Image (cartoon, helix red, strand yellow):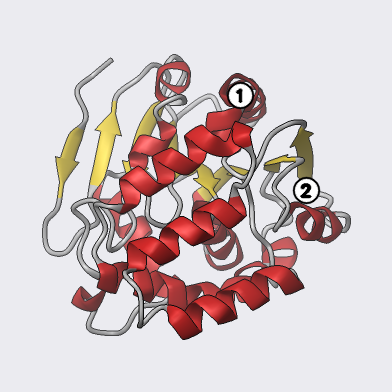
Amino acid sequence: MNTPRTTKENLMLDYKLYKGRGSEYIVLLHGIGGNSNIFYKQLKPFLKKYHIVAIHMPGHGKSPDIDSYKDGFSFDVIVREILRTLDHLSIRKAHFVGISLGSIIVHHLLQTRPDRVRSAVLGGAITRFNLFAKSLIKLAGIIKDFIPFMWLYRILALVLMPKDNHKDSRRFFIQEAYKMKRKNFLAWYHLAGDVKATYSKVQEKSEDVPKLYISGAEDHMFVRELTEDLRSDKSSELVILEQCGHVCNIEKADDFNELSLEFMDKHQVKKAYIS
């Protein structure tokens, strides 16, 4: 495995570039409070067939703080910066793998720049919030200014991943979130209220882009709504993993990797889309 290269210049997003086999690229997008380390169980199998670009979202890793963006912080800005990173690497088109929050970003990419997506794998995907999730977010919004943000993050992680078999994922997410600044976490938290808007035109705008959704049967806050929303999406496949929670790429890594690679392999092209 090649040593990853990390860079940040002119407010460019922090990323790790892994050179693997094959000619096509997979872009990995992590969840809120995490970083590219969440994909530690994917790197080795994915690199057998693909190169990998693991991007750290704004406010994560060594990427710029949220307040660095003078034109404000939005899903449009996030997608713009991701594409700017890929342009810097001369990657025209890629396979995207998003987990949790990363799936939301992939959704917004699919409805704004589907021409940049060869295929999409979305783990623990979020299309909209149910009543419980909305109530939780509203409550968290009330108390967030009165408690340390890591307390809030711990509470949210426990509610999202409550079972014993979710323990490793929960611990990993909390451990990585300690590296995040409070102001960046809260900026992402405020943005989360617009989740539904990131999916509203996905089916219309990206009907030609193949999409694979992988979720745990125990992903109790999102999987029911996801299943309902995908019924009308003819370009998507949904796989539900039993005895699995929100972070399916960690809890059921072997299943996730096998399904993802089989799916992406089907949608490879013979030559790389590199400008």
Q: Residues within 10 Å of mark 2 (few under 14, many from 20)?
A: some
Residue 69 drawn at (x, y percent): 24, 77
Q: Which quarter shows the N terminus? A: top left
Q: Position of residue 85 (x, y in %)?
A: 29, 53
Tell me the residue at 34%/57% (across/down).
Answer: 57
In this orientation, does residue 24 appear? yes
- Tell me residue 91's x, y (percent): 36, 43
| Numbered tag placed on residue 65 in the rendering | none
Callout 2: SS: loop
Which residue is found at the position 66% from the left and 29% from the top? 263
- On the image, which quarter does residue 131 sit in? bottom right
Task: Tell me what residue is drawn at x 53 percent, y 24 percent.
Answer: 270
Q: Going by the image, does 160 lie left or right of 45?
A: right
Quickly name the residue at label 2.
Answer: 235
| Disc 1 residue crowd, few under 14, some 14–19, many 20+, Cα 10 Å | few
Instruction: Answer left or right for 51 relative to 46.
Output: left
**Looking at the image, which is closer to me, 31 or 155?**
155
Indicate the position of residue 160 as horizontal and vertical percent values.
60, 54
Tell me which corner region of the image, top left, top right, bottom left or bottom right, holds residue 33. bottom left
- The disc at residue 265 is 1
Q: Where 122 falls versus 17 (above or below)?
A: below
The answer to whether mark 2 and mark 1 are in CB contact below 8 A is: no
User: Which of the two discs, 2 and 1, labels the residue nearer the N terminus?
Assistant: 2
Q: Amino acid at mark 1?
A: Asp
As rendered, which of 32 and 204 lies closer to the eye? 32
| SS type, badge 1 | helix
Q: Is residue 259 above or below residue 106?
A: above
Q: Residue drawn 42% across and 33% down? A: 39
Residue 142 relative to residue 34: left or right: right
In the rendered structure, which amino acid carries the disc numbered 2?
A: Ser
- The single residue placed furthest to the left in the displayed view is 9
Disc 2 from disc 1: Cα separation: 16 Å
